[in-house]
Image: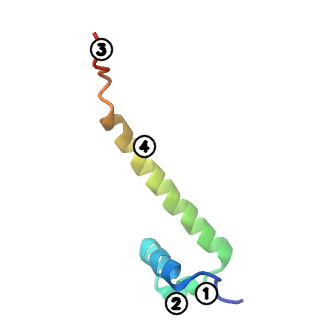
């Protein structure tokens, strides 16, 4: 299995976001990396949807 074909900057960012050592990230199978990225995106989506109702108080400002 060959290392992932990503730039060093991308590898550093992914390793930080996924909380894995960069050496593990570079030798991680692509399907596992995609699964972890999907989980990370799902968590980010959950966080943004829970914040959305607080942003709109339901008051339109019209009378």
**Mark 2 and 1 residues: CB-CB less than 8 Å, in contact?**
yes
**Residue 23 image offset from top left, x and y in percent:** 52, 90
Q: What residue sits right under mark 4 in the picture?
A: 49
Q: Residue at x 61, y 87 (%)?
A: 27
| Number of residues whose C-alpha sits closer than 10 Å to that of mark 4, classed few (under 14), some (14–19) or many (20 or more) | few
Quarter in which the C terminus is drawn: top left
Q: What residue sits right under mark 3 in the picture?
A: 62
Mark 2 and mark 3 lie on one chain; the one further toward the N terminus is: 2
**Mark 2 and 3 residues: CB-CB less than 8 Å, in contact?**
no
Mark 1 and mark 3 lie on one chain; the one further toward the N terminus is: 1
* Distance of label 2 from label 3 (alpha carbons): 57 Å
Mark 2 and mark 4 lie on one chain; the one further toward the N terminus is: 2
**Residue 8 image offset from top left, x and y in percent:** 52, 85
Mark 1 and mark 4 lie on one chain; the one further toward the N terminus is: 1
Task: Give the residue at the far top of this rendering.
Answer: 63
Which is in the foreground here, disc 1 or disc 3?
Answer: 3
Q: What residue sits right under mark 1 in the picture?
A: 27
Task: Look at the numbered disc 3 and give the secondary structure of its residue.
Answer: loop
Q: What residue sits right under mark 2 in the picture?
A: 23
């Amino acid at each position: 299995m060959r290392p992932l074909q990503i730039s060093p900057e991308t590898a550093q960012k992914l390793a930080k976001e996924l909380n894995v050592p960069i050496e593990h990230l570079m030798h991680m199978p692509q399907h596992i990396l995609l699964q972890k990225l999907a989980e990370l995106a799902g968590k980010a989506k959950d966080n943004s949807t829970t914040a959305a109702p607080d942003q709109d108080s339901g008051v339109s400002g019209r009378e």
